[in-house]
Amino acid sequence: MGATILGPDGKARCRWCGTVPQFVPYHDKEWGFPVADDRRLFEKLCLEGFQSGLSWRTILIKRENFRAAFHGFDFERVARFTTGDVERLLEDAGIVRHRGKIEAVVNNARRAKELVKREGSLAAFIWRYEPDPGSLGEPQTVSTSAQSIALSKDLKKRGWQFVGPTTVYAFMQAMGLINDHADGCLIRAKVESVRKRFKRPGR
């Protein structure tokens, strides 16, 4: 089975985006394009944590509900959530009602505030872990890397939760720290072009 599949327009895309219709616009417009916005980076780390044990389709369909529940993943606001907010969210059928994952978002918001105070921005910290493209293997052939393991360890050391190496690797794929679009995918070259122009935070 090849790494690509023909999309609705007859053009080759990463095979994974052909499984459900919602994946095509996500694949074409978001996945792999580099992100330097702290709130978007925080959101994705949180959503990857919620995905643990579930499918990305489940999370993507509920993404707007998550954004509403967590104030657009503004970690300054989420950091002020109380146990009452957690209980309220456990009644919200629009999101994944998992106490540990909800509490992890609140905890991670507080850790994000601390990290920004020390490092200047979440983006500057995270982009330090961008791997050398030459060190990467074939696209979509691994689920962790030396850099995702290192970033996971660093985040855990700083008190973050639900940030294991596999979760962090998926985050790095999505946020453009690596271009993991398959060879032959029409979006791969677009992502590479954007990455070349992208100004790395903190550099």
Image (cartoon, helix red, strand yellow):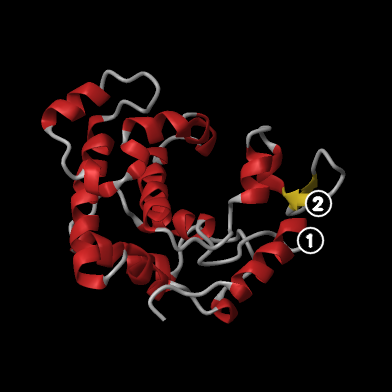
Q: What residue is shown at x 64% (from left), y 50% (from top)?
A: 29
Secondary element under disc 1, as helix, strand or loop, is loop
Q: Is residue 105 above or below residue 173?
A: above
Quarter of the figure with residue 26 = top right
One can see residue 118 in this view: yes
Quadrant containing the C terminus in the rendered view: bottom left
> Badge 1: how crowded within 10 Å, few (<14), some, or many (20+)?
some
Q: Is residue 98 above or below residue 10?
A: above
Q: How many marks?
A: 2
Q: What residue is shown at x 19% (from left), y 66% (from top)?
A: 117
Quarter of the figure with residue 86 = top left
* Residue type marked 2: Ala
Q: Which numbered disc covers residue 184?
A: 1
Q: What residue is shown at x 23% (from left), y 54% (from top)?
A: 160
Q: What residue is shown at x 66% (from left), y 69% (from top)?
A: 192
Looking at the image, which is closer to me, 152 or 196? 196
Secondary element under disc 2, as helix, strand or loop, is strand
Looking at the image, which is closer to me, 99 or 72? 72
The picture places residue 9, in percent across and down from the top left corner, at 85, 42
The picture places residue 194, in percent across and down from the top left corner, at 63, 67
* Residue type marked 1: Gly
Looking at the image, which is closer to me, 101 or 191? 191
Earlier in the chain: of badge 2 and badge 1, it is 2
Q: Which numbered disc covers residue 12?
A: 2
Left or right side of 126 for 112: left
